[in-house]
Image (cartoon, rainbow, N blue to C red):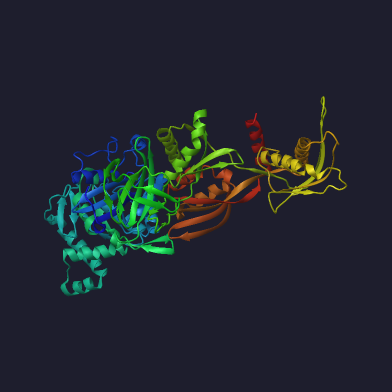
C-alpha cells in the first residue's frame, strides 16, 4: 500500500442498526476496487471485515474493523462498526477517530434503535455525516417512507444527492444529482437519466444547487447571477455544508448486491471531509492545554483507540496519528504509563491482514504489534514533548455477572485475563466485591458478557462460569445493645481467661469507633488491640446473614482478667462473642444499596416504564422532557435492577437506555430481609 498524505485521507465510520449492510458494503468496495476477486457473504463467514471466530459463529459484527479502500488516489479508512446495542463501545471508539460517519438505514426498517444510538453519538462527537438508504432492492423497500422517517427524526435538514432508479426488484441503480447522470448496477458506466425520471431529477437538483449555494457567499452570488453552478462549485458548496452540518446528504444503494458503488465512492472522495477539514484537537502537554492540527510538522501525538490480543499474532494496537508523522522502528513515549514503546512492525490493517508500511502521516490510522504497556485510551508521543489526548466518555456498564474459574488452574489466570479483556474493551470492567466475596464482571448486556467469556476461553485459555451476582447487602443496628462474655478455657498447663463487657450503638459519623471506658484497671489496656481485632473480625463476617457490618460505635466499659491465664487471644475471643450477643440486643437489620437511576425513553413508553419501576420498589424523583423523549429520575434498590437492561429493552423496543449510580444504603423491608437471611443461611450449609 502506498503512502498517503493528510489531504488524501478520509476516515469514515460506517454506523447504524444491525443488519443494515455495513459489513457487506465494505466487502463490495473491496471487490469493486479489485482487492478481492470474489464477494464474501456474512452468512458464509468469509467476509474480510467479520474475521473473528465469534463473529463468524454469530453472523454478526462484534468489533470495529478497519477496511482501507484505495480509490482515485485517496485512501478511505472505513471503520465498520457493530450495530448491536451491547457493542456500542466499539462504535464509540471508532467515532472518536473518524472525521465523518455514514449512517446506513435499511430500505424497509427505516429509523431503528441502532440508527438513533449512532445518531446520538455522532451528535456527541459533533461529526459530519451522510445517510445511505441501503438494500433498495429488498422486497417492500420504500424510499419515500424512509425519507419521511429520517426527516421526522433529524433536527438537521435532509438533502438528497441521489435518487433511486426504481426500487424493490426493479432497483437498477442510482440517479446522481451532482453530475446529472444515471449509474446502472455498480455504476462503473454512466448514462443519460431515463426520460421518466428526468423531471424528478431536475427538481431535486435545483434543491441541491440551492443548498450548495447557501453554504458560501461567493457561490450564492454566482447562483443569483447565473442561475446555476458548475459541478465543481456544487461539490465545493456541499463540502462546506457537510462540514458545518447545515444539511445531511442522503444517498441510496444496494451495496451487498453491488449496486450504486461508484457514485457512493465518488461522493466520499469528493464531499466527505479530510482530516485537514476538521477542527484542531485538544491535548494536555507539558505546559498545559495544546491544540493539535493534523500536520506532519506538528508535535507527534498518536491516540490508541483499540487493542486486541491474539494467541498467534500477539497484542495489536490500533492508533490514529493526530499530529506529526509515525515512522517504523521509532521509539515513542507513553506519558500515562511512563513507558517507552518501540514501533517495531508498523502496519495498516485490512480486516485481519496486516499490510506493512514504513510511514504514517498525520490523520492516518494504523497498527503496531507487541507493545508492552500501552492500552486503549493511551497517547503515544515524543519523550521530549509528552502529550495526552482526552478519552471519550463511554456508557457505564450496567449488566453484572459473578464470574468463577472452572478449574483450579483457571483460578490463577482469572485476574490477568479479566484485566486484559477490560483493557481491550472500554465498556467492560471488573472488581472484587468485598461484601459478597465475588468477582464481578460488568458489561452492556448479556450478549456482551457472553462474548467476553468466550473470548477469555479462546484467546487467554481460561475457563469461566457465570452466575447472577449476590447483592452487596450490609448489616447494621438500630438501637443500643449491651452484653458481656467470659471466655474460660482450662486444660492441662496454662489456661485462657478473658471477660469483656460492652455497649454498642448506631454510629452515623463513620464505619466504626471503639472507646475505652474501663475504670479502675479491671482490664489492662494492653488487651485493647486484641479486643478491637475480635470485634472488627465479626464486623467483616456479619452476625445475622454473613454480610459486613458498618456504622457501629462500641464502648468497652468493664471486664475481668486473670493474673496468669489472661492472654490477648482470650480477650479477642471474648470480644467476638460479646459483640455478637450485643448485636442481637441492638435491633439488627439488613441495609441494601439504593441506586439513583436516570432512564431515557420515548414519551409513548413512559407509562409502562413508570409502572414497571413501581413494581421494583422505585421512588420517583422527577422527570425531564426533551424532543420526544422523557428522562425519568428514580431511586431504586440494586436488588431490583440486576437484569433491568433486558427488561427496559423489552418495554421500549430497545429504544430506552439508562444510567445508574450508587446513592446510599437503606434498611431492607422486614418481610424481604427474612427471605434474604434464610437464603444466605441455606447457602452456607
At x 49%, y 51%, the residue is: 658
Whether residue 563 is visible here, answered yes or no, is yes
Residue 549 image position (x, y, % from top left): 68, 43
Furthest residue in direction top, as rendered:
492
Residue appearing at x 26%, y 55% in the figure:
9
**Residue at 62% in and 41% down:** 435
Q: Residue 601 versus residue 472: which sits nearer the camera?
A: 472
User: So how many labels did they put on this image?
Assistant: 0
Answer left or right for 52 relative to 373. Answer: left
* Quarter of the figure with residue 203: bottom left
**Where in the figure is residue 509, as x and y percent of width and height?**
70, 54
Above/below status of 586 relative to 241:
above
x, y (%) of residue 215? 27, 68
Is 542 on the left or on the right of 409, as rendered? right
Q: Nearer the viewer, residue 584 or 365?
A: 365
Please tell me which residue lies in front, 280 or 245.
280
Q: Residue at x 18, y 56 (%)?
A: 176
Can see residue 137?
A: no
Q: Position of residue 191 (x, y in %)?
A: 11, 53
* Residue 470 horizontal side relative to residue 25, left or right: right
- The quarter of the rendered structure image containing the C terminus is top right
Residue at the limit of the structure toward the right, as seen here? 520
Amino acid at each position: 500500500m502506498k503512502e498517503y498524505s493528510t489531504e488524501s485521507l478520509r476516515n469514515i465510520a460506517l454506523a447504524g442498526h444491525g443488519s443494515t449492510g455495513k459489513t457487506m458494503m465494505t466487502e463490495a468496495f473491496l471487490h469493486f476496487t479489485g482487492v478481492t476477486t470474489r464477494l464474501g457473504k456474512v452468512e458464509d463467514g468469509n467476509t474480510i471485515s467479520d474475521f473473528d471466530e465469534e463473529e463468524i459463529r454469530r453472523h454478526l459484527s462484534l468489533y470495529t474493523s478497519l477496511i482501507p479502500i484505495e480509490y482515485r488516489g485517496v485512501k478511505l479508512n472505513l471503520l465498520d462498526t457493530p450495530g448491536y446495542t451491547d457493542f456500542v463501545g466499539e462504535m464509540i471508539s471508532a467515532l472518536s477517530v473518524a472525521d465523518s460517519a455514514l449512517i446506513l438505514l435499511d430500505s424497509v426498517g427505516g429509523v431503528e434503535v441502532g440508527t438513533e444510538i449512532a445518531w446520538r453519538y455522532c451528535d456527541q462527537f459533533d461529526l459530519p455525516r451522510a445517510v445511505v438508504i441501503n438494500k433498495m432492492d429488498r422486497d417492500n423497500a420504500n424510499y419515500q417512507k424512509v425519507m419521511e422517517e429520517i426527516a421526522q427524526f433529524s433536527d438537521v435538514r435532509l438533502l438528497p444527492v441521489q435518487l433511486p432508479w426504481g426500487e424493490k426488484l426493479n432497483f437498477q441503480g442510482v440517479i446522481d444529482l451532482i453530475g446529472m447522470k444515471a449509474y446502472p448496477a455498480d455504476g462503473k458506466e454512466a448514462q443519460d437519466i431515463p426520460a421518466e425520471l428526468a423531471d424528478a431529477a431536475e427538481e431535486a437538483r435545483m434543491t441541491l444547487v440551492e443548498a450548495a449555494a447557501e453554504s458560501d457567499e461567493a457561490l450564492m452570488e454566482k447562483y443569483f447571477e447565473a442561475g446555476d453552478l458548475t459541478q465543481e462549485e456544487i461539490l465545493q458548496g456541499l463540502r462546506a455544508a457537510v462540514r458545518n452540518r447545515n444539511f445531511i446528504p442522503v444517498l441510496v444503494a444496494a451495496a451487498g448486491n453491488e449496486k450504486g458503488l461508484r457514485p457512493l465512492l465518488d461522493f466520499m472522495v469528493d464531499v466527505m471531509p479530510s482530516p485537514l477539514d476538521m477542527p484542531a484537537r485538544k491535548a494536555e502537554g507539558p505546559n498545559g492545554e495544546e491544540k493539535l492540527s493534523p500536520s506532519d510538522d506538528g508535535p507527534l501525538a498518536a491516540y490508541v483507540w483499540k487493542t486486541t490480543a491474539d494467541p498467534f499474532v500477539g497484542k495489536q494496537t490500533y492508533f490514529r496519528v493526530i499530529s506529526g508523522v509515525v515512522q517504523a522502528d521509532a521509539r515513542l513515549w507513553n506519558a500515562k504509563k511512563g513507558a517507552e514503546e518501540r514501533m517495531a512492525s508498523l502496519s495498516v490493517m485490512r480486516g485481519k491482514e496486516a499490510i506493512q508500511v514504513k510511514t504514517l502521516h498525520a490523520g492516518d490510522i494504523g497498527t503496531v504489534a507487541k507493545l508492552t504497556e500501552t492500552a486503549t485510551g493511551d497517547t503515544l508521543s515524543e519523550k521530549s514533548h509528552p502529550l495526552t489526548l482526552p478519552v471519550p466518555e463511554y456508557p457505564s456498564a450496567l449488566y453484572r455477572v459473578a464470574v468463577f474459574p472452572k478449574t483450579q488452574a483457571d483460578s490463577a489466570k482469572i485476574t490477568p485475563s479479566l484485566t486484559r479483556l477490560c483493557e481491550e474493551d472500554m465498556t467492560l470492567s471488573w472488581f472484587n466485591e468485598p461484601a459478597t466475596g465475588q468477582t464481578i464482571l460488568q458489561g452492556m448486556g448479556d450478549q456482551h458478557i457472553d462474548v467476553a467469556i468466550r473470548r477469555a476461553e479462546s484467546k487467554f485459555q481460561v475457563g469461566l462460569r457465570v452466575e447472577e451476582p449476590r447483592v452487596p447487602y450490609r448489616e447494621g443496628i438500630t438501637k443500643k445493645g449491651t452484653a458481656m462474655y467470659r471466655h474460660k478455657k482450662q486444660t492441662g498447663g496454662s489456661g485462657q481467661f478473658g471477660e469483656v463487657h460492652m455497649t454498642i450503638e448506631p454510629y452515623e459519623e463513620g464505619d466504626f469507633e471503639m472507646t475505652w471506658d474501663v475504670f479502675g484497671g479491671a482490664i489492662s489496656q494492653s488487651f485493647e488491640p486484641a479486643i478491637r481485632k475480635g470485634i472488627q473480625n465479626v464486623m467483616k463476617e456479619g452476625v445475622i446473614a454473613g454480610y459486613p457490618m458498618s456504622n457501629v460505635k462500641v464502648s468497652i466499659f468493664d471486664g475481668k482478667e486473670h493474673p496468669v491465664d489472661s492472654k490477648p487471644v482470650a480477650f479477642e475471643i471474648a470480644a467476638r462473642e460479646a459483640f455478637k450477643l450485643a448485636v442481637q440486643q441492638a435491633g439488627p437489620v439488613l441495609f441494601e444499596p439504593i441506586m439513583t437511576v436516570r432512564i431515557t425513553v420515548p414519551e409513548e413508553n413512559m407509562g409502562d416504564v413508570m409502572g414497571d419501576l413501581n413494581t421494583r420498589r422505585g421512588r420517583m424523583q422527577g422527570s425531564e422532557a426533551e424532543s420526544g423523549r422523557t428522562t425519568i429520575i428514580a431511586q431504586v434498590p440494586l436488588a431490583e435492577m440486576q437484569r433491568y437492561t433486558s427488561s427496559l429493552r423489552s418495554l421500549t423496543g430497545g429504544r430506552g437506555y439508562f444510567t445508574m449510580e450508587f446513592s446510599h444504603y437503606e434498611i431492607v423491608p422486614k418481610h424481604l430481609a427474612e427471605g434474604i437471611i434464610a437464603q444466605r443461611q441455606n447457602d452456607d450449609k
